[in-house]
Amino acid sequence: MGKPKRERSLSDSEAQAVARNLRVSPRKLNLVAGLIRGKKVDTALAELQFSRKRIAQDVKKCVMSAVANAENNHGLDVNELVVSEAFVGKNLVMRRFAARGRGRASSITKPFAQLTVIVRQKAEEEAEAGAKKSKGKSAGKPAKASKAKAAAKETA
């Protein structure tokens, strides 16, 4: 009996993992999440391994969990995975107090955060298209520079 199964919100080539109740402020966690956005999973894990931030190990666990979900639950190829999204949300905030002078108190907030990592399998056509675009961009820059040099010579 139970409730009906919820529809899958991600596409077939995506998998996600959520790390909840991470004992760090969302602002600090977002700095680490920004390191891995849009990168291949191998590169992201290497950067997290050698990051000097304390929370990087928990982020690494979450990325590895998303990769395991992609492989085991959705049958995706691990070598073609890219961290397509990594976003941070607020969680609970523990409020404490610190005794101050003259019988007063000041508040101390101890925030928690949560991290959602979504990995996507890049198709071979997308990878080739991305390579062609990057070649086109690099080829276009020198052409603009040479036009600027030619215009500078004409004015001189």
Image (tube, rainbow, N blue to C red):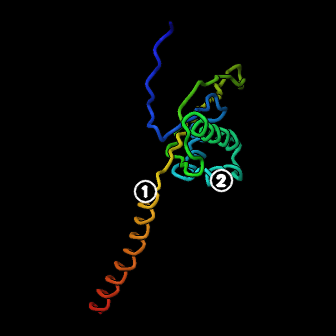
| Residue located 37% across and 74% down the image | 140
Whether pointer 1 and pointer 2 mark residues with C-beta atoms closer than 8 Å, the reply is no
According to the image, label 1 marks what residue?
125
Cα–Cα gap, marks 1 and 2 = 27 Å
Q: Determine which quarter of the picture holds residue 102.
A: top right
Judged from the image, the secondary structure of the residue bearing numbered disc 1 is helix
Q: Earlier in the sequence, mark 1 or mark 2?
A: 2
Say if 17 sits above or below 105 in the image: below
* Total numbered labels: 2
Say if 129 sits above or below 79 in the image: below
Coordinates of residue 136 in the picture (x, y in percent): 39, 70
Q: Nearer the viewer, residue 113 or 81?
A: 81
Residue kind at label 2, given as amino acid type: Glu
Coordinates of residue 99 in the picture (x, y in percent): 72, 23
Q: Nearer the viewer, residue 74 or 145?
A: 74
- Give the label, 1 or 2, closer to the camera: 1
Coordinates of residue 5 in the picture (x, y in percent): 47, 18
Q: Determine which quarter of the picture holds residue 68.
A: top right
Q: Which mark is residue 138?
A: none
Quick one: label 2, few (<14), some, or many (20+) residues within 10 Å? Answer: some
Q: Which mark is residue 47?
A: 2
Judged from the image, the secondary structure of the residue bearing numbered disc 2 is helix
